[in-house]
Image: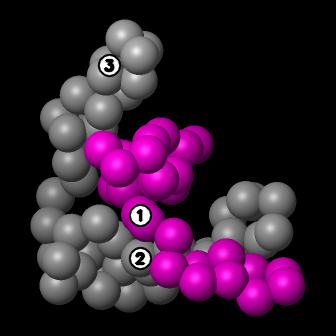
């Protein structure tokens, strides 16, 4: 699923982790974890279908932050 960042950009949500868009090719979008120094990445196809996850996470899911972002979007 997707939510908006504080700056209005799309964030990918996968397994309660959030990822920001990094780059794209004609067939693949590359997403990186929103937590600095985390090596986790996600690849999606051009229709945002999950293709694979790469790297190890170095933190717990940000479920609380995710709940706050979702609540903020509902209020807007």
Tell whether label 2 touches label 3 (CB within 8 Å).
no
Q: Could you say whether the residue bearing mark 3 is in a helix, strand or loop?
A: helix
The image position of residue 45, as x and y in percent, is 77, 71
Which residue sits furthest front?
A: 7
Q: Which residue is tagged 1?
A: 19
Quarter that holds the C terminus:
top left
Q: Nearer the viewer, residue 12 or 73?
A: 73
Q: CA distance from mark 3 to mark 2?
A: 23 Å
Quarter that holds the N terminus:
top right
Q: Residue at x 50, y 80 (%)?
A: 22
Range covered by the magenta-colored residues: 1-30
Q: Residue at x 35, y 50 (%)?
A: 7
Look at the picture and state if 75 lies above or below 65.
above
In the image, taking residue 19 as reference, residue 35 lies left or right, namely left
Work out whether mark 3 precedes mark 2 in sequence or the reverse, and give the earlier one: 2
Q: Could you say whether the residue bearing mark 1 is in a helix, strand or loop?
A: strand
Q: Is residue 25 magenta?
A: yes
Quadrant of the image occupied by residue 71: top left
For the question of whether residue 28 can be seen, the reply is yes
Q: Which residue is tagged 2?
A: 32
Disc sitting over residue 71 in the figure? 3
Q: CA distance from mark 1 to mark 3?
A: 18 Å
Work out whether mark 1 precedes mark 2 in sequence or the reverse, and give the earlier one: 1
């Amino acid at each position: 699923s997707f939510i908006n960042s504080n700056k209005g950009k799309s964030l990918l949500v996968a397994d309660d982790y959030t990822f920001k868009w990094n780059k794209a090719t004609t067939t693949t979008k590359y997403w990186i974890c929103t937590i600095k120094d985390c090596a986790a990445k996600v690849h999606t196809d051009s229709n945002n279908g999950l293709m694979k996850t790469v790297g190890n996470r170095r933190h717990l899911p940000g479920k609380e932050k995710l709940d706050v972002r979702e609540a903020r979007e509902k209020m807007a």
